Image (spheres, rainbow, N blue to C red):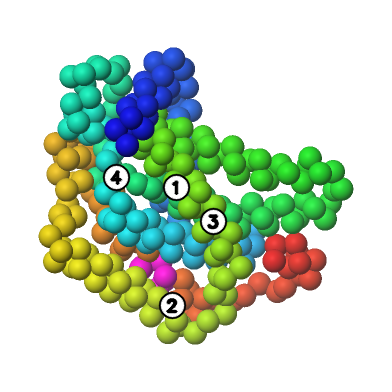
Amino acid sequence: MESAMSAGIAVAEALQNQLPWLENVWLWVNFLGDPKSLFLFYFPAAYYASRRVGIAVLWISLIAEWLNLVFKWLLFGDRPFWWVHESGYYSQAPAQVHQFPSSCETGPGSPSGHCMITGAALWPIMTAISSQMATRTHSRWVRMIPSLAYITFLLAVGLSRVFLLAHFPHQVLAGLITGAVLGWLMAPQVPMERELSFYGLTSLALLLGTSLIYWTLFTLGLDLSWSISLASKWCERPEWVHVDTRPFASLSRDSGSALGLGIALHSPCYAQPPSIPQQAHIWR
């Protein structure tokens, strides 16, 4: 594992020093691949295009983000920006790498949340667009465009995370694979017409399940705040340590989104748009 991490630092060094003109590109890609963007931008845009796809994006986002939190607690992955100091890598082979405001995330590093959560949540968008294009063209290459765009974007997100010293390549790869598998598995299982109690119980289950896992690991003697301490210790600037990257910040977002989705769908102010047979078939 030490060799894999050392190789990851070498990749980050190459990205930062050999391609410095791409810095703004990586920063923008990192922003677009941030799980928070799924809730703020991708979900509203997808819902505007298709109610079913929009709900799928939100539902998969909150479940995938919760699973990512649990995985990170169990896998204890280091992040490059603190590992280079804690491991003594700098004293052995000084690397020409530097941090960014987005580098200093406080949660464990494995698997990459940007890759896992975004990869899972964008799956229904990719499949919906693919289905739509399949009805309009017989060209195999044209029908592959959504899939190629999906893969290219996620690879770019992964590289941006390595560039920022937020993740090692193996953590990115784990996130990419897990995200794609989750998207494939969850997209057909999205709850569309359920009682309000279902969404309320889902929100409660996320909260109680996380609390149970946390206290179980804590009882076993595991310090789940270890990553927060390391991030605060080795981040170049204190203001770069963001509170919203702490594990329980994402939990509040996920449980709140689950409950909010149920309340919104059962609100008297909510009116389901009239169905259009052709569109319903395309985006189903």
Of the two numbered discs 3 and 1 on the same chain, state the one appearing first in sequence: 1
> Is residue 217 in the magenta section?
no
Type of residue at label 3?
Val
The residue pinned by badge 4 equals: 77
Task: Name which residue type carries label 1.
Answer: Gly
Q: Residue at x 80, y 66 (%)?
A: 278
Residue 200 % position (x, y): 39, 79
* x then y, percent, for residue 247: 27, 55
Q: Relative to residue 168, is residue 191 drawn left or right?
A: right
Q: Is residue 51 above or below residue 151?
A: below
Q: Quadrant of the N terminus?
A: top left
Q: Is residue 237 above or below residue 136?
A: above
**Magenta segment:** 255-260
Out of 18 and 101, give the one closest to the viewer: 18
Task: Determine the residue positioned at 61% across, 62% down.
Answer: 53
Of the image marks 4 and 3, the number of the one nearer the N terminus: 4
Residue under label 1: 175
Q: Which residue is mark 2?
A: 199
- The amino acid at mark 4 is Gly
On the picture, is 229 further left or further right than 32?
Answer: left
Per the model, the C-alpha gap separating discs 1 and 4 is 12 Å
Dot 1 or dot 4: first in sequence order is: 4
Identified at 39% across, 45% down, the residue is: 112
Asked whether the beta carbons under mark 4 and mark 2 sit within 8 Å of each other, the answer is no
Mark 1 neighbour class, 10 Å CA radius: few under 14, some 14 to 19, many 20 or more: many
